[in-house]
Image (cartoon, rainbow, N blue to C red):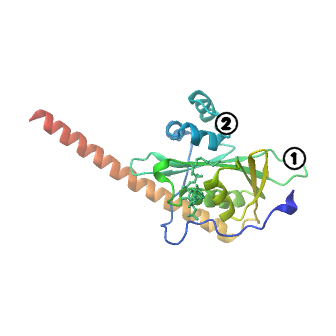
Amino acid sequence: MHNKLSPYQPTLRPSNSRALVPVRELHAGHRGSILRHFLQLNADDRHLRFGTQTPDEVIERYVDGLDFSHDTIFGIFDSQLNIVGLAHLAYLPSFKSNARAAEFGVSVLPEGRGKGFGTALLGRAAVHARNTRVETLFVHCLANNKAMMRLAKKAGMSVEFAYGDADAYLKLPPANPSTIVEEAANVQWADFDYALKENLKRSNDAWSWFLGKSFITR
Ligand SMILES: CC(C)(COP(=O)(O)OP(=O)(O)OC[C@H]1O[C@@H](n2cnc3c(N)ncnc32)[C@H](O)[C@@H]1OP(=O)(O)O)[C@@H](O)C(=O)NCCC(=O)NCCS
């Protein structure tokens, strides 16, 4: 299987015409926002994301079961701090002789698509995976998922097809000083972006409250 893997190509960043997308690592306090993100996906998108029909209750159980101490979840926030793009990097159990591996799953809300968010999430997850000694990154998706196929191929992943499903693999080289610095810079940029949006949202909310109140008392 490994001899089919293509070497990692550093093509995972959004194209130069797009601004660097701030991708933030999420924690258990984001569970509610994560659930809201998934519930906004329509039936077709849920099918593409999870590979099967996924009713709300199944998504609720999936979100309840997310283990933030084991896996890493990344998010991209809009100006209202809603999660517009979400990625789950799930570490697979490693056996004695097997190299460390992780599976990547991703979803971007329809209004956020085509802006490089999926690419940014894959790039961020791949760097984090390298920095946590993962050697192989897997993506499992439906073979007719053209957008995901495009993302995978752009990232230099090898894709294998079977029974309507596609498995993509990316062989990752070990971490080096530049991947560590890249991740640290991304963390800072995403924290800054979040803090900025949080402050703007607070002041907008305060103005809305104030204007609403002064309108009512007139
Ligand atoms: C797959 C998904 C995450 C992509 O998100 P995104 O933010 O639109 O991704 P990007 O903007 O970074 O890039 C998408 C790429 O796919 C291409 N693309 C989109 N739809 C396409 C289609 N129907 N056919 C071919 N390419 C397509 C875009 O042109 C773009 O390529 P480019 O950068 O060379 O122009 C998003 O479509 C999604 O959430 N789909 C539903 C869930 C899903 O399928 N998850 C993947 C399985 S885990």
Q: Is residue 71 above or below residue 150?
A: above
Q: Is residue 168 left or right of residue 196?
A: right
In which quarter of the view is residue 215 placed? top left
Q: Position of residue 178 (x, y in %)?
A: 65, 71
In which quarter of the view is residue 163 placed? top right
Q: Is residue 153 left or right of residue 98?
A: left
Task: Work out whether residue 195 or residue 138 is closer to the camera in this orientation and state it.
Answer: 138
Q: Which residue shows up at 14% across the image and 33% down it?
A: 216
Q: Which mark is residue 155?
A: none
- Secondary structure beneath dot 1 equals loop
Q: Quadrant of ligand 1?
A: bottom right
In which quarter of the view is residue 52 placed? top right
Task: Work out whether residue 58 or residue 147 is closer to the camera in this orientation and state it.
Answer: 147
Q: Given the image, on which type of amino acid does mark 2 rest?
A: Thr
For mark 2, what is the residue? 52
Q: Which residue shows up at 75% across the image and 63% down it?
A: 172
Q: Which residue shows up at 60% across the image and 35% down it?
A: 63
Is residue 121 in view from this perspective?
A: yes
Is residue 134 in view from this perspective?
A: no
Q: Which residue shows up at 18% across the image and 36% down it?
A: 213
Q: Given the image, on which type of amino acid does mark 1 rest?
A: Phe
Task: Work out whether residue 140 or residue 132 is closer to the camera in this orientation and state it.
Answer: 140
For mark 1, what is the residue? 95
Q: Is residue 75 above or below residue 42?
A: below
Mark 1 neighbour class, 10 Å CA radius: few under 14, some 14 to 19, many 20 or more: few
Q: Mark 1 or mark 2, which has the lower sequence index?
A: 2
> In which quadrant of the rendered image does the N terminus lie?
bottom right
Q: Position of residue 121 (x, y in %)?
A: 59, 56
Task: Work out whether residue 207 or residue 110 is closer to the camera in this orientation and state it.
Answer: 110
* Mark 1 vs mark 2, CA separation in Å: 28 Å
